[in-house]
Structures are given as structure tokens and as C-alpha cells.
Image (tube, helix red, strand yellow):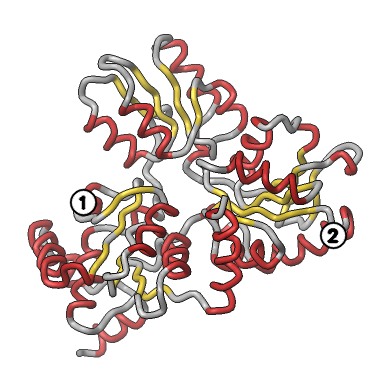
Amino acid sequence: MNIFKAVEEKAGMLPEKYRQMTTCELEAIVQRVKTKLGSKLFLPGHHYQKDEVIQFADATGDSLKLAQLSEENKEAEYIVFCGVHFMAETADILTTPEQKVYLPDMRAGCSMADMADIHQTDRAWLKLAELFGNTILPLTYVNSTAAIKAFVGKNGGATVTSSNAEEMVTWAFEQKQRILFLPDQHLGRNTAFNLGVPLNEMAVWNPILDRLEFEGDIEKVKVILWKGHCSVHENFTVENIKEIRQSKPDMKIIVHPECSREVVELSDLAGSTNYIINEINRSEQGSAWAIGTEMNLVNRIIKEHPDKEIVSLNPHMCPCMTMNRIDLPHLAWCLEAIEQGEPHNIIKVESHIGADAKLALDRMLAR
């Protein structure tokens, strides 16, 4: 190995040769390695992945479903997770020590997950305890780091998904008077509101300013929302909805609950990624939809339903940029490195963090 290749691989950089390959050459590598490794390889692909990657996925779904499928697949020695960092961490937490989880590009992170780091969370927890005593149970969206999941698990809380958030928030209120919801304020707000918690009983914890944002009597606070958000879903606006209502008044608007409260309130339907897919799948031929979620998925839904009129709620929306870092060259590089016995980009969660994080996951999965 020459010095330049060694530096590239040590830094986790895609070797130049993969950048120079044609699509056909890259696809041939992926298919060859998949065929050679057979059941030893499992390749889960998140709904938001590019078509060039998703075509090779052994299973598609949301992050938790793919992690659970990875856990169930005892034959796979190599799990190449086509998603983002926190998803691969969850797969590593749930799988056996003998199985190895890989992320084709280590730069594939999640801006929402990065909005809550463990140091900020530890500081917040101490200050919130001073304000509210032992009355708070932490919940975290699965779109969070392993360290945040571990914090929640250690403190008696659980993870939630966009599909089961209402069930888990209801469970949390059975345990404690208040909840701290990490890291997505919009999912937390929409969920609590749907369960009857008024907006004036929700506060926001600002991790940058390290303080609670709330006007009024803090004794009335029931929900503390971490000030984080999805960079994709926050870009759907009330103006987008007004434009659809004016130009296509018969078009239904369906959005993800990571969108703001104002957008969800003005939409016809709101639900998880699977909910959106299922609603479109069972809708009538000729129906019209504006979808407020990630663009790769919206484009795929459009292709799969030529009998329906489907548009993105925001016509200027870009795909999730971090999710898009997983591309065909990185996938080919990752698989060929495994084939050659020189794997890289292994995701390994420290055992003590993994154990506490699994507590949070198990509390949810037991519901």
C-alpha cells in the first residue's frame, strides 16, 4: 500500500479510484461482494437513501425497524448499515458482539442527533432537578446518539419512535409528573398536544444558553422540550401549505410529525414515515397528495404511484444532505474492504453505554 492510500484510508477518506469508476463498475463490485458473502452480509437501507444505494438493500424501513431486523439476523457477520451514524449505533447495541456493523461513510451523521450531546444533557438534568426535583422522566427519540439513549436508560426513561410516541409519552406520565423530551422539540410538542397537554404547559430547554425558556408559573410545566429539530422537516412552512391550498385546493397534505406544530396543525394528516407510505399506498387511484418529508423518499413514492398526483409540499426541498453521504462509491468501497479482509468504518458502541442504551430501547420494545 503506498503512502497516499494509507493516509486516505486512515482518515476514512474514499480512495480516488472509486471516484473514477463508472456506475456500472461500482454496481458490479457491490453485486459481486453481495453474491460472494451471501447470508454473511446484511445490508439494511433507510427510506431516505438514494435509489443508487437502496436498489441493493436487503431490507428497507425506518431506523428502528432496520436495527431490529439486524438483531434478528443471526447469520449475518457483516451488517453494512445504509443510513446515518445513530442508526448504525442502535444496530450495534442490539446485535451480538460477534457481529460487526459498518457505516459506508463515517461523515453520515444526523444534525438533529448532534443537537443534544451528553455534556449538555448532564448539565441540563442537574439544573432541571434544581427547578423540579425528582418529578421528571426523560424520553428520547430514537434519532439520538447512543450516549443520549444511555442517559435516558440510566435515569429510568425510554426511547420513542414517531410511530409510538403517543403511547410512550402516555407511559411516561404514568411514571412521573413531567417529561423531558430529547432531542426533537417538534415531535415532542406535536405528541404532547395530541394527548391534551396545552402549549402553555410546555417549556423549551435551550442547551446553547443552558436555560429553560418559559413564561409563567413553572409549576405548571408538564413537558420540557429539548431545543432541537430535523433540518429537513423544519423547512416545510405554513407558506408552503397556503400555496398548495390556493393552487390545488383538492390536494391532501400529509406531513411528518418532525414538522413544526403550525405546519402539522394546518395539514390534513401527520404521521411517521411508514404511516405516510401506507396512506399513499392505500389511497384511491387519481388522488392528489402533497407530502412533507425527505425528498429521496418523496421522489420514490412519486415513481411508485404514476396513477396519482404527488408533489413535495416544498418544491425547493433538498434531500437530507447527511443521509446522502452514503452513495454508491462509498458502498462499493466498504464492501470491497470487507471482502479483502481490510474493513473500515466499524461502528462500535462502548459496552457500558450500550448496556444503558439498551435499557431505554427495551423499555420501549416491551410496551
Looking at the picture, how far across and down is residue 8, in whole percent? Answer: 30, 79
Label 2: few (<14), some (14–19) or many (≥20) C-alpha neighbours in 10 Å: few
Looking at the picture, how far across and down is residue 255, in whole percent? Answer: 47, 30
- In the image, taking residue 117 as reference, residue 326 lies left or right, namely left
- The numbered mark at residue 52 is 1
Q: Secondary structure at mark 2?
A: helix
Looking at the picture, how far across and down is residue 100, in whole percent? Answer: 35, 75
Label 1: few (<14), some (14–19) or many (≥20) C-alpha neighbours in 10 Å: some
Task: Tell me the distance, in whole angstroms, between the alpha carbons under discs 2 and 1.
Answer: 48 Å
- The numbered mark at residue 129 is 2
Please tell me which residue is depicted at 34% across the width and 83% down the height of the picture. 10
Would you place residue 41 above or below residue 169 in this image? below
Looking at the picture, how far across and down is residue 57, in whole percent? Answer: 24, 55
Q: Secondary structure at mark 1?
A: helix
Q: Nearer the viewer, residue 277 or 229?
A: 277
Sooner in the amino-acid sequence: mark 2 or mark 1 = 1
**Amino acid type, callout 1:** Glu
- In the image, taking residue 300 as reference, residue 65 lies left or right, namely right
Please tell me which residue is depicted at 20% across the width and 90% down the height of the picture. 1
Would you place residue 256 above or below residue 34 in this image? above
Would you place residue 351 above or below residue 32 in this image? below
Numbered disc total: 2
Please tell me which residue is depicted at 61% across the width and 67% down the height of the picture. 150
